[in-house]
Amino acid sequence: MRTLTTLLSVTVLVFTGMLAHADDHAAPTQPVGMVYGMDVSDPAAFAAAMTKYWNSPTGKQSPGIAILRQVVAAGESSISHLVSVAHPSYDGMDAAFALNAASADWAAFLSEVDGIATVVTSSVFEGTGLGSMKNNIGAGPGVATLYIFISVSDPGKYAKSWQKMMGDADLGETDTMLFAIPAGGVDDTTHVASISGKSVGTVMAQMNANSADKAFQKFIKDVAGIRTIERKIVTVDLAVFGNTGG
């Protein structure tokens, strides 16, 4: 596995928090970025380093929003945390890369986390704008999310079936979004579905309810020949950093 310093020396941390900010401010529904699955040996020190960076002059200039998530279930994977930052566009990502390239604050962050965190997986993501955010759950401490990593052979057909299911199914107290994974990813993953709620219990109760939902059952039947589930993980948000609009 690659160390955090070698992988991130030319990049900024990225992911899904811009779908809805922790303070309920509006945000782009099609953010782009990267997500890193991390094996962190000293969570407190890692969180402190992230806090220091995002409170630094460089962090305050960054157009991104970072999220630190604890992984509570990941099967046999060694991933303990997800580190995320989302941007409204690739131009925003490029601006963050350039900002960090000459930043002493970024160099200090890399030095502080070297040896306590290892990158296990890394992926580029793109928001598809498909899904439902009617509960406006967003990201913030305590928010739980089930991520379903999917390999899709016919994205157009899948997206059509997905959005029809979103309109017909009862999503309860959860929000569900679909992301494309154009690079990186886990196994043969092409897309990730996220189901978020205010607790792990809320999310898992909704998944149990889905199994009896007619719209969900029809969706599973419609995409059976074009979809393979690669992996599922459950996370709980620990902190949100960056320009959250407050």
Image: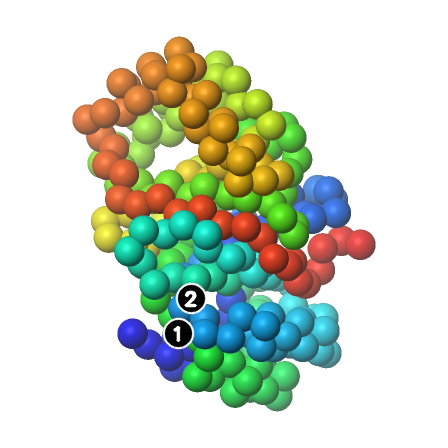
Q: Which residue is mark 1?
A: 118
Instruction: Give the number of the disc on residue 86.
Output: none
Find residue 24 and report its horizontal and vertical position in percent. Answer: 73, 42
Q: Amino acid at mark 1?
A: Thr
Residue depicted at 65% across the width and 52% down the height: 141
> Farthest left residue?
225
Camera sees residue 179: no
Find residue 72 and report its horizontal and vertical position in percent. Answer: 46, 52
Rendered view: 177 above or below 37: above
Camera sees residue 16: yes
> Farthest front residue?
201
Q: Earlier in the sequence, mark 1 or mark 2?
A: 2
Left or right, residue 2 beside residue 144? left
The residue closer to the viewer here, 64 or 239, is: 239
Figure quadrant of the N terminus:
bottom left
Residue 138 occupies which quadrant of the picture?
top right
Number of other residues with Cα within 10 Å of mark 2, as a class: few under 14, some 14 to 19, many 20 or more = many
Q: Amino acid at mark 2?
A: Met
Find residue 58 and report its horizontal and vertical position in percent. Answer: 67, 77
Cα distance between the residues tagged 1 and 2: 6 Å
Left or right, residue 48 beside residue 183? right
Rendered view: 19 above or below 32: above
**For numbered disc 1, what is the local secondary structure?**
strand
The residue closer to the viewer here, 58 or 212, is: 212
Residue depicted at 61% across the width and 57% down the height: 238
Q: Are marks 1 and 2 in contact (CB under 8 Å)?
A: yes
Figure quadrant of the C terminus:
bottom right
Q: Which residue is mark 2?
A: 38
Rendered view: 143 above or below 102: above
Find residue 158 and report its horizontal and vertical position in percent. Answer: 32, 28
